Image (tube, helix red, strand yellow):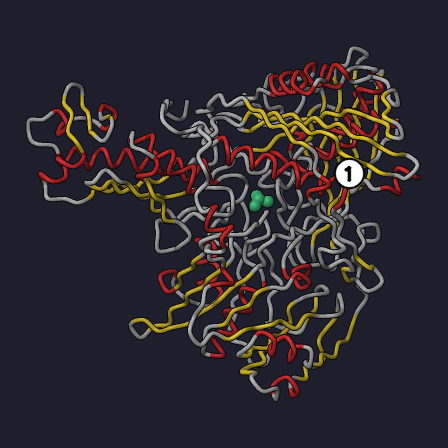
Amino acid sequence: MPYKEFRLNGTVGKPLVRRGGREKVTGAAKFTAEWPIDGMLYAVPVISTIAKGRIVSIDTDAARKTPGVHLVLTPENAPSIKQISTMSPANNQTSLASSIYPVSGYDVYHAGQLIAAVVADRFETARDAALLVKVKYDPSKHITDIEEAPADERPKSLFGAPPVIEIGNAEKELKSSPISIDSEYTLAGNHHNPMEPHATTAHWTTTDGKPFLTVYDATQGLVAAKMTYAQIFGLKPEQVRVICQYVGGGFGSKTSWPHAILAIACAKIANAPVKLSVSRQHLYGAVGHRTPMRQRVSIGADRDGTIRSIIHSGVATTSQKDDYAEAFTMATRMMYRTIALRLDQKQCRVDTQSPTFMRAPAETPGMYALESAIDELAVALNMDPIELRIKNEPEQDLHQKKPFSSRLLVDCLKQGAEKFGWKERSMKPREKKDSPWLIGMGVAAATYPAFSSPTSARVTLNADGTARIDCCSQEIGTGTETVQTQLLADLLDIAPTRVTMELGDTDLPPGGLSGGSATTMSVGGAIVKAVDKLKSELSNLGQSGSKLATAKPDRIKFEKGRVVVEDEATSFEDLLKERNRTSVTGLGEFNAGRDAPTSNHSFGATFVEVAVDEELGLIRLRRILGQYACGTLLNANTARSQFIGGIIMGVGHALQEETRWDHRLGRITNDNIAEYHIPVNADIPHIEIGWNDTPDFQASPIGAKGIGEIGITGVAAAIANAIYNATGKRLRRLPMTAEQILA
Ligand code: MOS
């Protein structure tokens, strides 16, 4: 066991009310675009209207002459912008997500590229003047359609793994399987559309004769953002501070994109603080998206359902300048037992902004295809799809050849089926009616890896029995402050109301990027280490001759505001007073390293009941149930909300969300949330959440694996499978819309 097991008997797991909730609903919470700075100017970008080519000229005269305009920034007058490598699993020193830099040259790589900016004393003035900037282009032929771009390339790596994986002879096993299926699935591109706009306010000052850059940035990774801006603008890390107290949704898109670089460049040249808040329309080119995809899954099995072969292949797009690869075959490496496996991912380059992580990248699109295919196989076998999954439960991770830290997928399927009333489902489609509706049930497995990132945290214990956590993590909306204060409260055996947490400022000990559902485990792991350090510090304060003075940290316990070693107990207050101290601190660092002895993932099962009106093509969700096993859950309230949020995003992915390009122009046509559809309350039925919270200390120093993203994985397949059960029609394109029912 890589981590020491411990048991907490306080508030961990309890549904404590989340911190910051009141501030958010009353408007007191300060989001990035809301930080006021004296003398602040506003930047509005000018974006390219062509998808590919060169800028011939930028006429800024009319914009510059507009009263209130301070600056029009173009490649002509831009400061030096150093090009650096983008973020990757091996490089956590940057959060840069796109190599398409603003104001750094005259090449156009996609429509909506930020090519200039107008800076004015009022936002409205800047927006107005930006329309007066006249850009002349020399366009060249572009491709934005995945169907047109040649898929003649393989990604360099899929989060560190090769794009082709072969175990046995999958083609041969498929051919010799008595039962087989072979299906293609098509997925539309998606944009994240967080409620809070992407925004950056940059402020250059001078400290000790040297430039100092303060950045208020809407980001999922403050420390990486700081390193990014330092490198790009030729500063030492200590010359940059990034602040972000709240994030109003990121979903993978709030890393560092051109708008942030543009804001910092504008502030430098304007010699004033500059705010750039990305409009909903500009978001579609300014930041990344989930790529469109085509996937093919073939599965062969014996008549009793034993899987012999799985082949999962396909293509995703990437941009001309970057190599982001949507790793949709990733989960297929380890989901089921099979004699032979072949995974093969290709990519094609299109003239768009770089695609990027979008909530549960890899697993969301991949599990849609795989779990649809498993359902198709169950139909071909005339077998219950839960039975089929249980029959092919693997002994270990097939690709990594390691045991699972914990799995519990079968438990989730069985428990979920029981609660959902799965036995009411008809094996045959079109059997259940509630006229004019056809009713169907579907199930799909969910999974997400248990990632972590290197994180430091400082714990301070005060003489009055209060405590504080300092960690430059970020509150991306999930309740980090709430759950981590619960954790520390239990570790110190004090009330959670006595614990506070400071985050969102790079002056604090460095935390990791909040992506990959990694934050809870990473910050928690650092806190556990910090408490060990704190115990050593307390031991140093022990009176000579006392058991405390010679005790190893392991033997020091906290009980009701006292430090206890065997039969000796001293209150925090007395201990600190004796030494004239008001507080003691411990700094902890957590780094899981890269070579876990086990394959670490969370698992779950998603159940859906749909109603379909075939005459009108309507698809209505009636009920959804998600049953999960993600290790310890620190807070029942925030956990439930996370799972529900994931499921709702899955509903959007399944039934509504689609970025539409006009391929003739290479431009996105639905660049607003009137036409880019996301679920509203009326689209969402009752959602029931259940879990098995057996701790997983094999995968996590606090027994908890991430829960931010698993909720979305499997939703699209469960809905597709339910639609098949209702209608007998297999929909193989996302989003699944009325046209496909009517076709
Ligand atoms: Mo998440 S897409 O890993 O921010």
Q: Is residue 257 above or below residue 137?
A: above
Residue furthest toward the left? Answer: 545
Q: Is residue 665 above or below residue 529?
A: below
Q: Residue at x 64, y 80 (%)?
A: 129
Q: Is residue 448 left or right of residue 562?
A: right
Residues 433 and 648: in front is 433
The amino acid beneath tag 1 is Gln
Q: Position of residue 110 (x, y in %)?
A: 71, 63
Residues 699 and 44: in front is 44
Quadrant housing residue 641: top right
In this orientation, does residue 74 appear?
Answer: no
Q: Position of residue 19 (x, y in %)?
A: 43, 43
Q: Is residue 175 left or right of residue 316?
A: right
Disc 1 secondary structure class: strand
Q: Is residue 679 left or right of residue 498?
A: right
Residue with the mark numbered 1: 295
Q: Position of residue 560 (x, y in %)?
A: 24, 28
Quarter holding the C terminus?
top right
Q: Residue at x 42, y 52 (%)?
A: 504
